[in-house]
Every structure is written in structure tokens, then in C-alpha cells.
């Protein structure tokens, strides 16, 4: 899917080759300004591919979401007993290509109010699709952030 995105971008004249880079030159600009709804380079060599619109057509992604739907209410406990109490607002695939730079600290979701600290309104769930040894730099969280 990742490689196919670059083929389509090339076929439609958005990048000069059907690859994410040529040598050390990335073919897509950094950030949403230079990206697309479906694909954005978040930092050099790190890409986010939006999959929310593909859930019906990509069976493997749909299986992951279905599994999370059954686990999420159990993990959160409290009064949550059904996925109907939640809304899946984003599903994406993060791809770090060989030689990509470390990603800078950032928030994965906006605040509902920038003047007042409010209770949590969303949960981000990260599912690595392969083993993540410490050398690969797994996702880190800042306590109370």
C-alpha cells in the first residue's frame, strides 16, 4: 500500500518518480502543506498513511480495527461496555523508511480547550505490526501529558 501510494502520485504528476526518495532526496515535501489527505511526510523519511477510508477495502486493517473494538471497552473499564460508546476518528499507518530521522516530540491529538485543562476526550492506540526493540525507538509517552 505504501509503495502503491507513490506510484499513484507519480502517475498523476505530483512527484517526479514512483518512489518516496531518490538517493537521499525525498520526493514529497514535509508536513500537511505538501502532503495529501491520504499521505503526509511527518518528518524526513517518516510517513503517515490515512486508512480510515479504506477499512471496507483493506481486510487486514479491518481485522485490526475489529479486534481493537472488542478490546477497548475492556481496557478502559468503568462504564464502557460497548464500542458503540466510542467513535473511531482516525486510523493510520506510520511508516519509517531506512535512514529516517527521529521524530520530534508532538501531540497526537488536539485539545478541546486551549485555555483550560480538561479531562481526556480521546484515546490514541498504537499497534506495532512487528517487534519494536529499543534500538528502533518505540513510541514514548510523557506522563500527565
Image (cartoon, rainbow, N blue to C red):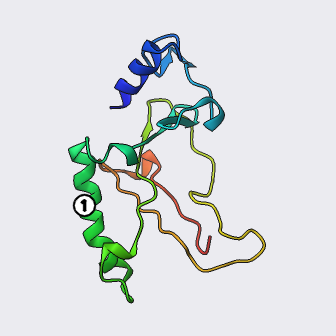
Q: In front here: 45 or 42?
A: 42
Q: Residue at x 56, y 24 (%)?
A: 28
Categorize mark 1 by other alpha carbons within 10 Å: few (<14), some (14-19), many (20+): few
Query: Which residue matches tag 1?
Result: 66
Q: In front here: 111 or 20?
A: 111
Rendered view: 61 above or below 122: above
SS class of the residue under badge 1? helix
Q: Residue 6 vs residue 129: left or right?
A: right
Quadrant holding the N terminus: top left
List x then y, in percent, for residue 124. Answer: 46, 63
Quadrant holding the C terminus: bottom right
List x then y, in percent, for residue 50. Answer: 44, 43
Rendered view: 88 above or below 113: above
Q: Residue furthest right?
A: 115
Q: Residue 19 vs residue 104: left or right?
A: left
Q: Residue 56 vs residue 38: left or right?
A: left
* Quarter of the image where one finds residue 78: bottom left
Q: Residue at x 30, y 50 (%)?
A: 131
List x then y, in percent, for residue 70. Answer: 25, 70
List x then y, in percent, for residue 83. Answer: 32, 72
Q: Residue at x 45, y 37 (%)?
A: 96
* Quarter of the image where one finds residue 114: bottom right
Rendered view: 47 above or below 6: below
Rendered view: 71 above or below 40: below
Q: Residue at x 61, y 75 (%)?
A: 144
Amino acid at each position: 500500500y505504501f509503495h502503491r501510494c507513490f506510484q499513484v502520485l507519480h502517475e498523476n504528476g505530483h512527484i517526479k518518480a514512483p518512489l518516496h526518495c531518490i538517493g537521499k532526496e525525498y520526493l514529497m515535501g514535509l508536513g500537511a502543506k505538501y502532503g495529501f489527505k491520504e499521505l503526509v511526510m511527518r518528518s524526513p523519511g517518516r510517513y503517515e498513511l490515512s486508512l480510515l477510508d479504506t477499512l471496507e477495502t483493506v481486510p487486514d486493517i479491518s481485522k485490526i480495527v475489529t479486534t481493537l473494538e472488542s478490546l477497548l471497552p475492556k481496557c478502559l473499564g468503568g462504564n464502557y461496555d460497548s464500542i458503540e460508546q466510542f467513535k473511531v476518528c482516525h486510523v493510520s499507518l506510520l511508516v519509517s523508511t531506512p535512514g529516517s530521522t527521529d521524530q520530534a516530540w508532538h501531540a497526537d491529538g488536539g485539545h478541546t480547550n486551549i485555555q483550560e485543562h480538561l479531562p481526556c476526550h480521546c484515546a490514541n492506540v498504537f499497534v506495532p505490526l512487528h517487534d519494536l526493540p529499543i534500538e528502533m525507538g518505540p513510541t514514548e509517552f510523557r506522563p500527565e501529558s
